[in-house]
Image: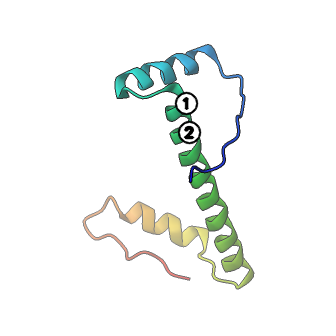
């Protein structure tokens, strides 16, 4: 049984539409297929970003923090011959 679908309409800049058309041609797929793939990837990315934000906020609420100076010292050490271990909470 085919999944239920809905039509979504969006106005996009002409340059972006041209890139989508070129990609569809290169992949030998329809414009709709390219748009569906792109939208699905974006939604997945935003859902993951939201999940990670909630996880980070929970860490803050629980006091699992790393001082800014510790991060800077670690990052600066990465360009040396003896880098520091990553800081932990």
Q: What whole-number distance in Å separates the C-alpha atoms at marks 1 and 2?
A: 6 Å
Give the crowd class for mark 1: few <14, some 14-19, many >=20 residues within 10 Å: few
Residue at 57% x, 47% y: name it: 40
Disc marking residue 32: 1
Disc marking residue 14: none
Give the percent coordinates (x, y) of residue 76: 42, 61
Q: Is there CB contact under 8 Å for labels 1 and 2?
A: yes
Taking 46 as reference, is 71 above or below it? Answer: below
Between 34 and 17, the one lying in front of the other is 34
Q: Give the secondary structure at mark 1.
A: helix
Q: Is 55 situated left or right of 72 in this image?
A: right
Residue at 36% x, 28% y: name it: 27
Give the percent coordinates (x, y) of residue 62: 71, 85
Snapshot quadrant of residue 26: top left
Give the percent coordinates (x, y) of residue 78: 35, 63
Between 56 and 9, the one lying in front of the other is 9
Between 58 and 27, the one lying in front of the other is 27
Color theme of the render: rainbow
Give the crowd class for mark 2: few <14, some 14-19, many >=20 residues within 10 Å: few
Snapshot quadrant of residue 11: top right
The quadrant in which the N terminus is found is: bottom right
Residue at 57% x, 69% y: name it: 69
Q: Give the secondary structure at mark 2.
A: helix
Give the percent coordinates (x, y) of residue 29: 42, 29
Query: Which residue is identified by label 2?
Result: 36
Taking 69 as reference, is 22 above or below it? Answer: above
The quadrant in which the C terminus is found is: bottom right
Residue at 51% x, 41% y: name it: 37
Taking 64 as reference, is 80 above or below it? Answer: above
């Amino acid at each position: 049984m085919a999944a239920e679908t809905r039509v979504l309409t969006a106005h996009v800049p002409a340059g972006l539409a041209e890139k989508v058309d070129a990609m569809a041609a290169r992949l030998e797929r329809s414009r709709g297929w390219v748009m569906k793939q792109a939208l699905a990837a974006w939604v997945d990315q935003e859902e993951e970003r939201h999940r990670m934000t909630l996880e980070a906020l929970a860490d803050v609420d629980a006091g699992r923090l790393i001082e800014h100076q510790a991060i800077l010292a670690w990052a600066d050490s990465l360009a040396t011959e003896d880098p520091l271990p990553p800081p932990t909470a």
